[in-house]
Image (tube, rainbow, N blue to C red):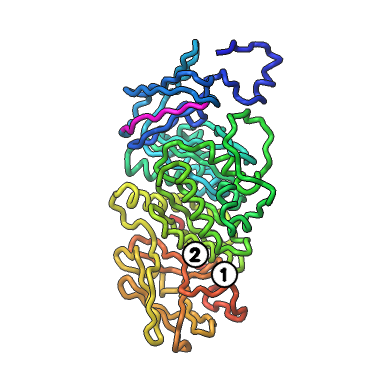
Amino acid sequence: MKPIRLLAFLWPLALAANLSAADLKLAALFSDHMVIQREKAVPVWGWADPGEKITVTFGDQTKTATADATGKWLVRLDSMPASAEARELVVTSSQPGGKITVVDVLVGEVWLGSGQSNMALTVQKALRFPKEQAAANLPRIRMFTEDSPAAKTPQADASGSWAVCAPDTVGKFSATLFFFGRELHRKLDVPVGLINSSVGGTAIQLWIAAETQAADPELKSASGFDPQAGANPAPKKPASSTATQPQNGGPGGLFNGKIAPLIPYALRGVVWYQGEANTKSSHPELYQQQLTTLITDWRKRWNDEFFFAWVQLPNFIRPGEGWPRVREAMLKTLQLPRTGMAVTIDIGMPDNIHPLNKQEVGRRLSLWALGDVYQKKVASTCGPLPTGHEVKGSEVTMAFSHADGGLRAREGDLTGFEIAAADRMWKPGVARIEGDKVIVSHPDTANPVAVRYAWADNPTCNLINSAGLPASPFRTDDWPANSDPKAIPASMPKVPPKMANP
């Protein structure tokens, strides 16, 4: 290696410069207190001199690699079982003095959490923080908070560190991600590593690679691409975290700055809480294509069909059809394999875009993961989802999946359904439950053609399954938004009955 420069006046320059090829360096994710994904091959990577021999040792495994012409090197540890034993990950180079030791490394389940402010919202801002803080002595749960800015081009390395869950650290953890991970930790009894990479107020376009959106005419148009801008070049070598970056980086800017540096860290899956920013789009229904593209593209780049779940937007007062249509887009994205969705239409706050009951959001995500990902027995993995409908005379029969134990109405008569004939005039539906089906009618609608449920920004609705999980909003029609301005739902008061936060 080149000699270490000790002159104090060169230190600021060293901070601002790109990584010297002479420095042995691990990607930031490989740092003290990290959690390695169990039962998968585990990529470990970093940088050194081109041609330099690298040895990585963990437990009884030793792997070697040679840095390529750019200085990048990568090894893959063999799949291993979960372990709460604190061990060292040791990386050495063929150059004298080249050694890095990462301490307190556990093996367990690793999940990435991403999205906008409802994923970024911290435990200290969620419900019952003093109680949660007092119970947070959970050293086998760790969180890496990615704090890089957006970037115009894909960045090679992340910025952040792992924190061990404790009363003095948990307050800054992502609340949704922490409560999700805590449930997994309780039920699986293995270490849990959580990676939070989220930014408030951001649209999904910022989280999808620019070249992927540019290749799709609809996404390209929706993302507002500069026609002179080309595809992203290959990731640059890691630069100092003090480097100036644009606030959002344009389409793909947050993918470049906050997701690309995480690839290909081994994960079990991703949980996503975003969509609020896209409700203001002129075509919110495009969100299905955007979310599908994001999931497909991230999986391709990781070379892993990992699991992916999201939080459907909760109830919130924002007039118009943006919120219902983004919720619908999220429902339709369940067509992708190995995906799930937490329905939260009953635990939002009508006057607060940041509902505080993140405990229940995390729990509902965990029910999906425990049941579908880990094959554990749970009461239900999701609330009722529509599977089809049939018109018979003056009635429409709706069928549902996830009607575990039968459908029911929470607190009183079944509400939230509307019905319409070909005139597209919506009327409050008279709905009754028969097993896993709901039959909807209205005395003045002799020939119905369509049914909607909870189709409003802040609906009154109460269809649940026996596990108490709410049904997803849906519609059977494909009519354009506000197709008849006179057809204002009469059954949808703005403020729903107060429901207790669990």
Quadrant housing residue 63: top left
Query: Percent x, y for residue 58?
Result: 37, 24
Left or right: 419 in relation to 322: left
The secondary structure type at the circle numbered 1 is: loop
170 in relation to 391, above or below: above
Callout 2 amino acid: Glu
| Residue corresponding to mark 2 | 328
- Tell me the distance, in whole angstroms, between the alpha carbons under discs 1 and 2: 20 Å
483 in relation to 250, above or below: below
Query: Percent x, y for residue 334?
Result: 42, 59
Quadrant of the drawing holding the C terminus: bottom left
Asked whether residue 334 is drawn in magenta, I would say no
Q: Crowding near pointer 1: few (<14 within 10 Å), some, many (20+)?
A: some
Residue at the image point whose x is 64% and y is 41% from the top: 152
Nearer-the-camera pick, 29 or 471: 29
Find the magenta span and give its range: 72-80
Nearer-the-camera pick, 19 or 386: 19
User: Which label's residue is closer to the chain start, 1 or 2?
Assistant: 2
Callout 1 amino acid: Lys
| Residue corresponding to mark 1 | 494
Left or right: 117 in relation to 34: right
Please tell me the numbered disc located at residue 138.
Answer: none
Residue at the image point whose x is 58% and y is 63% from the top: 284
Query: Percent x, y for residue 283?
Result: 60, 64
Residue at the image point whose x is 54% and y is 69% from the top: 456
Quadrant of the drawing holding the N terminus: top right
The secondary structure type at the circle numbered 2 is: helix
Q: Furthest residue to the right? A: 9
Asked whether residue 77 is drawn in magenta, I would say yes
**Res 416 visible:** no
472 in relation to 131, above or below: below
